[in-house]
Each structure stands twice: as C-alpha cells, then as structure tokens.
Amino acid sequence: MIDLLLPSAVSVAEAFHDPPDLPLLGAEVEEVSRAVDKRRREFTTARWCARRALAGLGFGPVPIPRGERGAPVWPDRVVGSMTHCAGYRAAAVARDTDLRSLGIDAEDHLPLPDGVLRLVASEGERAHLAELARTRPEVHWDRLLFSAKESVYKAWFPLTRRWLGHEGAELTFATDGTFAARLLEYDPRVPAEGFTGRWAVDGTLVVTAVTVPPDRARLPDPAGAGAGRPV
C-alpha cells in the first residue's frame, strides 16, 4: 500500500500479520528482551520487513538496531523508515544517491481521541481540516494530519538530528492525495521550502509518505543517519 506513495527508487516491504518465529539479529535481541509480547511482535515484524526491503537494494540480512531517539540505524549509504499499527507493518529504504531522506507512517483510520487534535494541530490547521471534511467527509482528516506529521518528523530527523514537535510544521492537504509541510523550525540542512508528501486511505488504514530528493541543496548528512520515532 505504501509503495504506491513512493518513487520507484524506494524498496518497500509490508506485512498484514506477524509471521511466527521470525529471527532477530545482533543488538535487536537485547532491545526487546524485556518488551511485552505486542511490542516484541511489532518490532520483529517491522525489522523483517526492513530486511526484505533492503534485499531489494542488494543487501543481505543485517541488524537494524535503535539509535538516537529510537531511530533505526541503517547500513551505510541507505536512508529508510519503518512504521507499524494494528494489523500492518512496513519498511521503505533507498540509496542516499536517490533520496536524501524519507519518512513513512501508517495509522488506524479512526478519529483521534478527544482532545488530541488541539495538541497536534494549530488553529489554522484545524480550520483547514474542517473545510476538507465538508468536501470529503469519509476521511478522518485529524488522523491523517497526525500521520503526516509523523512522516514529516521521520524525514526531518535524519537530516538534522533534532527533535521536531507537532507544532514545528504546518500542513496543508489536497484531495488529490498530496500534502505540503511548511517547517516552522529552521535548519540549514533541510529544504527551505519545506517537505511535500503523499497520502492514501484504504479501508481501515491511512498511510502517508515524505521523500526528500537529492537535487535539493545538499549538505553533508550527520553521522548515523536513520529515520523515525522509536520503532
């Protein structure tokens, strides 16, 4: 599903259940040694997806440990992102000659819990979502906004090694399946015009993706590039 939102240079793998007896490699074993079963299963299947996606770039099985702020640590010269929600796990990777960064996110296509939208959306964003809801009432725009901001963060962090809160980007959506993120936090390593992304809703899932192409003003990437909030 997420592959439809990404360019052909990106290798994607996804799963709609947790296969039994998947192996963990290297430091991954210790990272979930004390985790509850649900957390262990989503962690393991997401990394199984990541290894399948890496195989699409010609890589053999490698550990994908958690690095700074829980971001996955990819092999050298690879950028990537992982996501999981109920009944869905996915990973996407690309060579850093094809993309500078990418972020993906999947969420249950349900309304956000009461009170959460005010924590993650500006007044202007809430008005924008209300207008969109009049046009496409079947879409849970609040959940879509949350997912898109997760994807924005996952694309931002490998470039900057800095936290970006939900208030750090203001998003606008188009009903054609695209969105734009105006970044309110300045960093010279990210495109001044912000990020663009794509979104889709399919049944019980909403998915979003952000890619940063290599032809934008490129500065040296910080060491240990990864992507994503803890996965």
Image (spheres, rainbow, N blue to C red):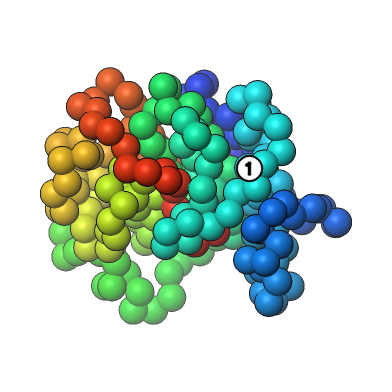
Q: Is residue 168 left or right of residue 151?
A: left
Q: Position of residue 31 (x, y in %)?
A: 63, 66
Crowding at dot 1, Cα within 10 Å, few <14 / some 14-19 / many 20+, comes out as many
Q: Is residue 29 left or right of residue 178?
A: right
Q: Which residue is mark 1?
A: 50
Q: Is residue 187 above or below residue 41?
A: above
In the depicted view, which residue is nearer to us: 136 or 96? Answer: 96
Picture residue at 67% right of the left edge, 66% below the top = 30
Q: Is residue 103 above or below residue 127?
A: above
Q: Is residue 51 above or below residue 186?
A: above
Q: Is residue 44 above or below residue 73?
A: below
In the depicted view, which residue is nearer to us: 74 or 142? Answer: 74
Q: Position of residue 7 (x, y in %)?
A: 47, 25
Viewer can see residue 200:
no
Viewer can see residue 158:
yes
| Disc 1 residue type (three-letter) | Ala
